[in-house]
Amino acid sequence: MEKQGTAKMLEEIGVFLELRGENPFKSRAYYNAARTVEMMGEEELRRLVQEDKLKDVKGIGAALNEKLKEYVLTGELPYYEELKASVPEGLLEMLRVPGLGPRKVRALYDMLEISSLAELEYACRENRLVGLKGFGSRTQENILEGIEFLRRYEGQFFFIEALQAADTLLAELKEYPALDQISLAGSIRRCREIVKDIDLVASTDEPSGLTDFFTGLGRVEEVIARGDTKVSVLLDEGINVDLRVVKKEEYPFALHHFTGSKEHNTAMRHRAKAMGLKINEYGIFRNGESLKCSSEAEFFEILGLQYIQPELRENYGEIEAAEKGTLPLLVEKEDISGVFHVHTNYSDGINTLEEIVAYCREHGYQYVGITDHSQSAYYAGGLAESDLERQREEIEVLRQNYPEVGIFHGVEADIRSDGSLDYDDKVLEKLDFVIASVHSGLKMEREKMTSRLLEALRHPLVTMLGHPTNRLLLGRDSSAFDLEKIFQAALDNGVILELNASPARLDLDWRHLKKIKEMGLQVSINPDAHRVEDFKDTELGVAIARKGWLGGKDIFNTRSRKEMEEYLRV
């Protein structure tokens, strides 16, 4: 076991050195030493160290000899620990992707500042690897496939991934003839941004038949547990599913119980107790007698509450608001009139301008806001001033050819480290709107990042703040800054906050949206689209907006085309 641990350490040192961009011969020396140690007998390594003969072994130089002696005799090697601490953890995570070695990981870090698996996936989906030396479209596809393979076994999934799997599963289960009712429950029904498993609640008079049907589905890879009322399985996508089967009369109670967060359910039980009632997944009881209830709406009514939408059941004040009858009318996907933050093949998007406008016409969007990357984003094909002018001319032609769609010409301008934008005002003045975003220096110290964002928000030509916290789900935490100051500055300067609906971002966080609503700020639900298929992510943004208590009046892009043209002065 000692030699295996030593060989592994040597191998990791070689990897760390490569990731740091050290001389390749140095890395190779550690790799070769690892192979040499692996070939030794179980006790040979310690014997050679104790007899001071390790230096005589081929492939073990003087420097390696000293390090190996220190490690074998003390069990520690500061050099190894220092190297490990000097390499971002995310780079090691990226090495788990099949076919992605230290050199390529280092190249991605140097050229694109990618330091986590989630950032790597996002860059691939934005086609940023296609033009990089040593990569290309095929490599990018292979990396995405490798990331998807890894995620199957990590136990956490983007909301959209779990939802797609759940919707397909629901459609299959609805084919069971004796099914009475079935619904999503748990974190998916509450629209949590990260989901660990899928919860389903169903009612039928033939529970064993339904569970047989469920476990026999082709997508079920493994049956984990099976009882009379609950079945747990693993789908071939790698996500666990729990199916609860109840009687028809129990269904409303079970659905509520298995939808709410623990905190919501606890608060609801306390409320029921104060009213002389008891609630659980089987019913509402008064003095041991079960009260009839035909729906969740009736369940809430018995408890003296407005119906609480599933997305809100987090114990964030929804019960108190429901008691007063002040729950908001939440935004619906049909309320969205158009979208902003759309990239074309002028920068790192896939589709042409005309393809995007034609798509908007076909799908009933009243307007679209084009925002390719600005010149600082060289890695994403950022537009020079001449490119912006050429794009403006093409948009003028498209406006004539597609009068049904309002086309707003904008840009996603980089916020530099000092808070300035990377175009002169004379360039920005020609645009209909500007989204200002941070794409570099994401880990800037809190006070400096706050000052940087405040400076950008004060710019008179900034319309929106893009992906405000810069987080990437399952990969990168939010940048550190004073949220209160940023929200207040956005309000003071009339800047709209983006709710970036990309499944990897969902930024703003829903936990901030209620505060934003109370302040009177406007939020724009933007898909950050790099292909026309990404427009559907707007619906995901709507789900998060609902979870954050937002109604149609809180959403900037529920305005009609005429209202938007007046606002943007187009």
Image (cartoon, rainbow, N blue to C red):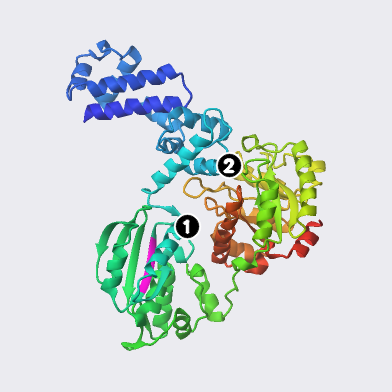
Instruction: Name the residue located 51 percent from the left edge and 47 percent from the top edge.
Output: 477
In reply to whether residue 200 is colored magenta, the answer given is yes
In front of the other: 390 or 245: 390
In front of the other: 308 or 390: 390
Instruction: Name the residue located 80 percent from the left edge and 53 percent from the top edge.
Output: 400
In which quadrant will I find the N terminus? Answer: top left
- Tell me residue 159's x, y (percent): 47, 57
In reply to whether residue 399 is colored magenta, the answer given is no
- Residue type indicated by callout 1: Phe
For the residues marked 2 and 1, what is the alpha-carbon distance in whole angstroms?
A: 24 Å
Image height of 558 relative to 460, above or below: below
- Tell me residue 257's x, y (percent): 39, 73
Instruction: Name the residue located 18 percent from the left edge and 22 percent from the top edge.
Output: 41
Q: Nearer the viewer, mark 2 or mark 1?
A: 1
Image height of 127 relative to 339, above or below: above
Tell me, for residue 159, which label it has, or none. 1
- Tell me residue 533's x, y (percent): 58, 53
Residue 45 seen in render:
yes
- Tell me residue 294's x, y (percent): 42, 84
Image height of 9 relative to 491, above or below: above
Label whose residue precedes the other's in the sequence (2 or 1): 1
Q: Residues within 10 Å of mark 1 (few under 14, many from 20)?
A: many
Would you name the residue on which mark 2 appears?
Answer: 442
Q: Which residues are magenta?
A: 198-202
Q: Quadrant of residue 517?
A: bottom right
Q: Main secondary structure of the magenta part?
A: strand
- Is 519 on the left-hand or right-hand side of 194? right
Q: Quadrant of residue 335?
A: bottom right
In front of the other: 563 or 214: 214
In which quadrant will I find the C terminus? Answer: bottom right
